Amino acid sequence: MVNLWNLIILDPMLNGLVALASSLPEEIGVGLAIIILTVIVRLALLPLTLRQLSSTKSLQSMQPKIKELQKKYGRNKQKLQQEMAKIYKEAGVNPAGCVWPMLVQFPIWIALYQSVIRTLATAPENLLDLAQHLYSWEIVNSAIPLNSYFLGLDLGQQGSASGIGGLVLAILVGGTMWVQQKMTTAPSTDPKQRSQSSMMLLMMPLMFGMFALMFPCGLALYWLISNAIGVVTQYFIGGGWGYLLPASTTQPYDKAR
Amino acid sequence: MGGQSKPQGFSGVVSSDGILYLGSTDGKIMAIDPSARDQDLSFPSSSSGEWPFTFTLPSRGTLCGSSSVPVVMYGKPVTSNGMVCVGIYNGKVLMLNPLIRSQNLPFPQAKDGEWTYPRTDDTIEPIVGSPVIANDTVYVCSSDSRIYALDMAYGDEKWRSAPLDGKLWTTPLVDGATVYVATFDGHIYALSASDGSLLPWVFEAEVGFVSAPVLYGSTIFAGSFDRNLYAVKVGHDKPLWEFAGGNWFWAAPVVDGDIVYAGCLDGKLYAINGRSGGELWEFDAGSSIVSSPAMAGDLLVVTCESGDVYLVNAQTGDGRRINNPDDPQNTERPSIDASIKGHICVQDGIAYICAQNNYLYAVDIARGKISWKFSLEIE
């Protein structure tokens, strides 16, 4: 299973990343290659992302109806399920439709993550491991070991050991993740739910900000670019800043209606 | 999700005056008496000069605050004039006096020749290769692209080279008044051993060098990231020959007369004609060969990442595998139940192997058997 994963997904992506870095100016090669590969992968997965966003949006637009049903059939779970299935069918919405595009994208994201982290090979063990994944292409072997510096930052070094640059990167990772989440998180009228979603809205960005300090900066760069692409995609597909700006909090519902 | 693992190190074993010195994978530097281990005496045995030594460094980071971290070692220890020197990945060079370490006195005891470089809590960039001692000087390469020359007696810095290109993860090669170093950016530089200045000759390859260079006569042998082993005559611009392997030649080759024995990450040991670069024979070990083979008479002890240990005839390339002592009939089970990456040491017909499970193994070469193993995890 591991061999199959390496053969089909990881190795092509890893070698692609190294070859890309090799064909770019050495001083910025790895960083730029991470950015370009992240953009390519996100673009390749755009149809799935669009489907996911569309499903999520449809589900959000149906929330008022779902709440009405919950009020009406709150005690009769079976009836509630039946009625919900009915309105989903009428609207042509599959509740799982926002999940499976995300699941399909996961292996690609993991491969990209592994490619970035393996390519940066900071310790001898990592370099030995990298040797087992590289093709015999000249463009790949001539690039090893990659110059891991990008804009003054050692992408192979932990964010926490990279001084102010690592800290800024971590803040940007957390910040862009917060923006992306905020754009899609509908404010709830229920105080309890609102408190929960506010907590979630903070937890994930904080967690990834911490990860950005704990992991090599190259990975943080990948998260940053990935988040930024997510924000741009959301902006254009979702029709603006969504729930990010207070004035727009009711827009998606209103539009849906 | 996989990816980069925390550095564990793979230092290996050396011997001096009947004592083995090694770096364990849990960050200890140890002196081990093989005869005491053969008799299964308690460690450290009182009269044999055995000791474990733990050196820790304060950790640094914007978040973690202060705590201590154990050392990680990739280079093998080196011995000279009764002293033991190690370069550690954490960025320090340590000089130890075995007599003092066996008394477990605080480190370093300057009056007994012990020191650290740098002296303070400061560190230099990671040291991956082994130090080399010559001319009462310790030469060591660092990831900051420099070679450092340190006074052996006091640890004072004699000189540090100007930064060469790329990280220096290699072991320097000292030949009289010249220090040679092979770099990740594909150069073999020659420096003055007395002041570190660059000498006129430099060899430039298109791809970086991965293995430590080895000098035999006037020829330097070194493995490159382009999967070739290079033979370069000192003073020449073109390689004498290039030998293509199936992956990198990570381990430094071993040269015996006209034959170069080179272990490769493609799992093969190649015997190469040192003059022509032609292949004499190859032996397939089945898994990446990370450490250099060790010569034991007309046999070569070859270890690989899978944990297998082979005894290979140096003339014919015929080899036989050492069976696992816990399961001698099972030919599928690796000789040792752990990866082997560290330097092998052969002494008095016994090969000593430090595996990644933090055990030291003694292989009786004549009998083709593992005679004992010893856990290096000592409290």
Image (cartoon, coloured by chain):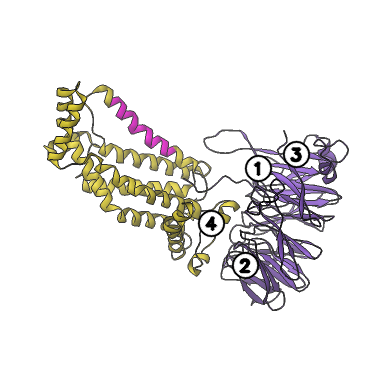
Chain colours: A yellow, B purple
> Which mark is first along the chain, 1 or 2?
1
Q: Earlier in the sequence, mark 2 or mark 3?
A: 3
Where residue B208 sits: x, y (%)? 58, 65
Which residues lie in the magenta part? A194-209
Residue drawn 27% across the image and 25% down it: A193
Which residue is identified by label 3?
B53
Crowding around mark 2 (Cα neighbors within 10 Å: few <14, some 14 to 19, many 20+) is some
- Label 1 CA crowd tier, 10 Å (few <14, some 14–19, many 20+): few
Foreground: disc 4 or disc 2: 4
Q: Chain of mark 4?
A: A
Q: Is residue B171 magenta?
A: no
Residue furthest toward the top? A75
Q: Could you give the CA–CA distance between mark 2 and mark 3, rounded to whole angstroms? A: 37 Å
Disc 2 and disc 1: Cα gap in Å? 29 Å
Q: Which residue is mark 2?
A: B187
- Report if residue B209 is visible in the image: yes
Q: Residue furthest bottom?
A: B276
In screen coordinates, is A68 left or right of B4?
A: left
Q: Is label 2 or label 3 in front?
A: 3
| Label 1 residue SS | loop
Residue B67 in percent (x, y) is at 61, 33
Q: Earlier in the sequence, mark 3 or mark 1?
A: 3
Q: Amino acid at mark 3?
A: Phe
To which quarter of the image does residue A23 belong?
bottom left
Label 3 marks which chain's residue? B
Residue at 87%, 50% (x, y): give it. B17
- Give the CA separation, mark 1 to mark 4: 31 Å
Q: Secondary structure at mark 3?
A: strand
Query: Which residue is denoted by mark 4 in the rendering?
Result: A130
Amino acid at the residue labelled 4: Leu
Q: In this figure, which residue is indicated by the disc labeled 1?
A: B122
